[in-house]
Amino acid sequence: MKTTKTTWCAVLTIGLACVTILTVGCGPVNVIVGGGGPVAGPSPMPPAGPALRMFHPVGGQTWHLGHNYTINWGAAPFVHRVRVYLSRNNGASWQYIGWAHAHPGTKVWHVPNMAAYLTHHARIRIVDMNNPANHSTSHMFRIVP
């Protein structure tokens, strides 16, 4: 008999949730939720949620030149490293500012003390290094003196 294993993950407001579905032949399905024991369940469900989700900045904040700020996100288990980008023009173009391990989902960024970084249209984007289709972008925030 053929055994298939499918895992879907979603970043929720309460954290990351994963579901693993094991199918043996055409028989019953075992669903393992968050690494717990098997629970009887129905046939496979659709994939749930994004692989990456931005938590901070969420938009509306004010950051200051020359200060450190923490960028936070949630990531599915299959995301290992992310690239971090800054836009100063509401996403029209992106500047690479560094990379980080996807877990624990944190990068501290020092805003350069340069007038070129002043903007009322800043956004941060995180991108899965192995699959750029997995990404998340903050809403606009300001960078001021």
Image (spheres, rainbow, N blue to C red):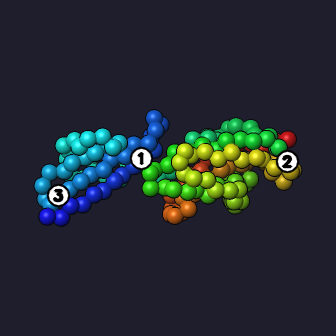
Q: What residue type is labelled 2?
A: Asn
Q: Position of residue 107 (x, y in %)?
A: 64, 47
- Tag 1 residue: 10
Q: How crowded is mark 1: few (under 14 residues within 10 Å), some or many (20 or more)?
A: many
Q: What residue type is labelled 3?
A: Val
Which is more toward the observer, 63 or 76? 76
Quarter of the image for residue 94 reads bottom right
Q: Position of residue 71 (x, y in %)?
A: 64, 44
C-alpha separation, residue under disc 3 versus residue under disc 2: 59 Å
Q: Quadrant of the C terminus?
A: top right
- Tag 3 residue: 24
Task: Of the two numbered discs 3 and 2 on the same chain, state the one appearing first in sequence.
Answer: 3
- Residue furthest top as drawn: 14
Do labels 1 and 2 touch, CB within 8 Å? no
Whether residue 53 can be seen here = no
Of tags 3 and 2, the one toward the viewer is 3
| Secondary element at image label 1 | strand
Do labels 3 and 2 touch, CB within 8 Å? no
Q: Quick check: 116 left or right of 129?
A: right
Task: Of the two numbered discs 3 and 1 on the same chain, state the one appearing first in sequence.
Answer: 1
- Tag 2 residue: 113
Q: Residues within 10 Å of mark 3 (few under 14, many from 20)?
A: some
